[in-house]
Amino acid sequence: MSAVLESMPPRLAFEPLPQRRFGKTGEQVPVVGLGTGPGGIGLTDAEAIPMYEAALAGGITYLDTAPGYNRAHAQLGQLLPSCRSQVFLATKCFAGTAAEALAIHEQSLRDLQVDSVDLLYAHCVGSFEPEQLLAPDGVFAGLREARRRGWTRHIGFTCHHHPGKAERLLNEALQGNLELDAVMLAMNFVDRYTYAFEERVLPLARQLDLGVAVMKVFGGAKEMNYEVNRESQLTGGHHAAFRYALGLPGTSLAVIGMNSAAEVERNIAWARAWEPLTGEEAERLEAEGRRLSAEWGAHFGEVA
């Protein structure tokens, strides 16, 4: 066991970060979560694991991961046996069918060295057709089965592009045809003017009282490449972007991919001191967002 985790009593001893209700799950989660993509893809275990420990020690107890993040599951598997009860653990399955989802998640549990997770997302639903996902043998049937087996407590989906597909899924949920507990959406002050998740999708999630996690708060890594430590798409104004994300109505937390202890410390400090944007700040950010949106274009994928 690491020195950081050894020094912790059975319950986390630090002052918790500000918490918010995670929708109808009833869970209380910190306002910032740790995205493990950069650590799993771009860092060695010796580099990533101390960073994860620093996040836990600072109160970031929401851990977001995925089997596609290279070493992330194996890295977390070295930590979770000693702190599983103290974290909210979310992972994903990039799959169109129930059989694929269950096979992926079963392997994820082995790699994470846990019996279950708190939240299992259908990953990047914009890459699939809703009819496939909603079919009797589609991915959501697999998520429901994973929950029945006790492999997850909550289910949801993530969406990076094709906001219309997220709209379709949430409308199915509003009609009682789809069970969901949470969503994670790509929302930032720039891509608002390209993908418009804030206007098209977020209100539906709020109607359903879903837990809402915001991802790509800084626009994601340039060219979506995490194999080396790269700047985010946004090269300045990160604090304003952070404040924007947490100010979106109904948002529970911002999930941020971090690749250094310095990033962890910065985001913890911002979380503790968060204040909503003033009217004047929001106006300036809107102008900057529209300008950058024209430069970035549809960098996550198609808009529809």
Image (tube, grey):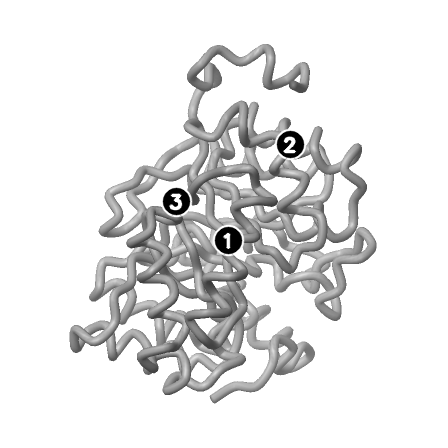
Q: Residue at x 22, y 64 (%)?
A: 208
Upstream in sequence: badge 1 or badge 2 = 2
Q: Residue at x 42, y 43 (%)?
A: 116
Name the residue tied to disc 2. 78
Q: Alpha carbon of mark 1 to alpha carbon of mark 3: how far?
A: 14 Å
* Viewer-side residue, 153 vs 211: 153
Identified by mark 2, the residue type is Gln
Instruction: Please say if 60 is above or below 213.
Output: above
Name the residue tied to disc 1. 106
* Viewer-side residue, 36 vs 238: 36
- Using the rendered view, name the quadrant where residue 222 is placed: bottom right
* Viewer-side residue, 92 vs 18: 92
What label does residue 226 carry, if any?
none
Q: Residue at x 36, y 54 (%)?
A: 251
From this viewpoint, is residue 194 visible? Answer: no
* Viewer-side residue, 274 vs 82: 82
Upstream in sequence: badge 3 or badge 2 = 2
| Residue 125 x %, y % | 47, 74
- Using the rendered view, name the quadrant where residue 132 is placed: bottom left
Name the residue tied to disc 3. 118
The nearer-to-camera label among 1 and 2 is 1
Q: Quick one: label 1, few (<14), some, or many (20+) residues within 10 Å? A: some
